[in-house]
Image (cartoon, grey):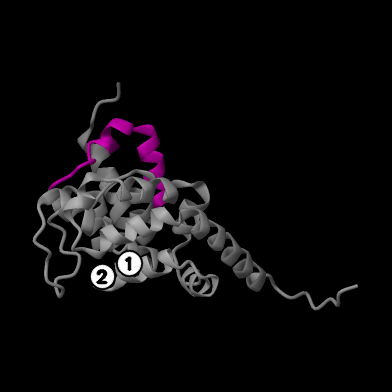
């Protein structure tokens, strides 16, 4: 069993704050106990998701949340301009994780009170046109997480979380429920939009079709 080493923990923190996702993956693989010691971090200064958000390392945050199942702390000041919801710690972690995840997916450096509601709308009606506009500005790490199936696992887990019943007033709960209910169609539309995006990105060789 690998010992939880403070030096390794410091290296993990540094990889998060510098946005070195390749290094972070390596450390998580080599030192699973040290990496796991951050799970459930209640102190914002010792929470990897909080650190990634504060440093605006969107791809790292997406990986931490979707692939590693980590959550923001209840004490994260996601956006000091927006009034804080008065949830208990478990519900606050759920809601803040949703806020910073959605913002990071869209490569935004701030949280908007309408972000979760916007995602809920395209999740409820996964129109290809709307999704195409959305996919054009999202973080590539999110594309990977959708293609790998981690996004599906995450939304199903969040939609069925016991905290949903206690957080009905927040858009985050409704967002995850809508995502889970329509995940098959969303993934299908997502693949179609990605194919169209790849076609547009392919350079024109100038050759005429035969």
Q: Are marks 1 and 2 in contact (CB under 8 Å)?
A: yes
Helix, strand or loop status at disc 1: helix
Label annotation for residue 103: 1
Part of the protein shown in magenta: 20-42
Magenta span contains residue 93: no
Helix, strand or loop status at disc 2: loop
Marks 1 and 2, how far apart in space?
6 Å
- 36 falls in the magenta region: yes
48 on left or right of 148: left
Residue 179: x %, y % from top left: 39, 57
Where residue 124 appears, as percent x and y from the top left, is: 41, 65
Please report the residue visible at 34 percent of the width from the left and 45 percent of the height from the top.
157
Q: Earlier in the sequence, mark 1 or mark 2?
A: 1
Report x, y in % for residue 12. Answer: 29, 44
Q: Quadrant of the C terminus?
A: bottom right
- Chief secondary structure of the magenta span? helix
For the residue carrying disc 1, how many other residues have a C-alpha within 10 Å: few (<14), some (14-19), or many (20+)? many
Residue at 37% across, 59% down: 178
Residue 51 in percent (x, y) is at 23, 56
User: As displayed, is residue 61 above or below residue 78?
Assistant: above
Residue that mark 2 sits on: 111
């Amino acid at each position: 069993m690998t010992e939880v080493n403070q030096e390794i923990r410091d290296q993990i923190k540094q990889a998060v704050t510098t946005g070195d996702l390749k290094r972070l993956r390596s450390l998580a693989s080599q030192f699973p106990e040290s990496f796991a010691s951050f799970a459930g971090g209640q102190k914002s200064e010792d929470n990897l998701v909080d650190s990634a958000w504060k440093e605006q390392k969107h791809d790292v945050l997406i990986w931490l949340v979707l692939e590693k199942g980590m959550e923001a702390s209840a004490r994260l000041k996601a956006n000091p301009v927006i009034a804080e919801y008065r949830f208990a710690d478990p519900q606050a972690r759920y809601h803040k994780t949703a806020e910073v995840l959605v913002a990071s997916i869209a490569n935004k450096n701030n949280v908007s009170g309408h972000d979760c509601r916007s995602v809920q709308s395209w999740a409820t009606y996964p129109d290809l046109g709307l999704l195409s506009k959305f996919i054009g500005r999202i973080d590539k790490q999110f594309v990977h997480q959708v293609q790998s199936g981690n996004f599906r696992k995450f939304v199903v887990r969040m939609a069925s979380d016991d905290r949903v019943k206690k957080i009905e007033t927040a858009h985050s709960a409704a967002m995850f429920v809508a995502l889970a209910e329509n995940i098959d169609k969303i993934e299908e539309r997502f693949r179609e939009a990605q194919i169209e995006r790849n076609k547009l990105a392919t350079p024109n060789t100038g050759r005429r079709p035969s």
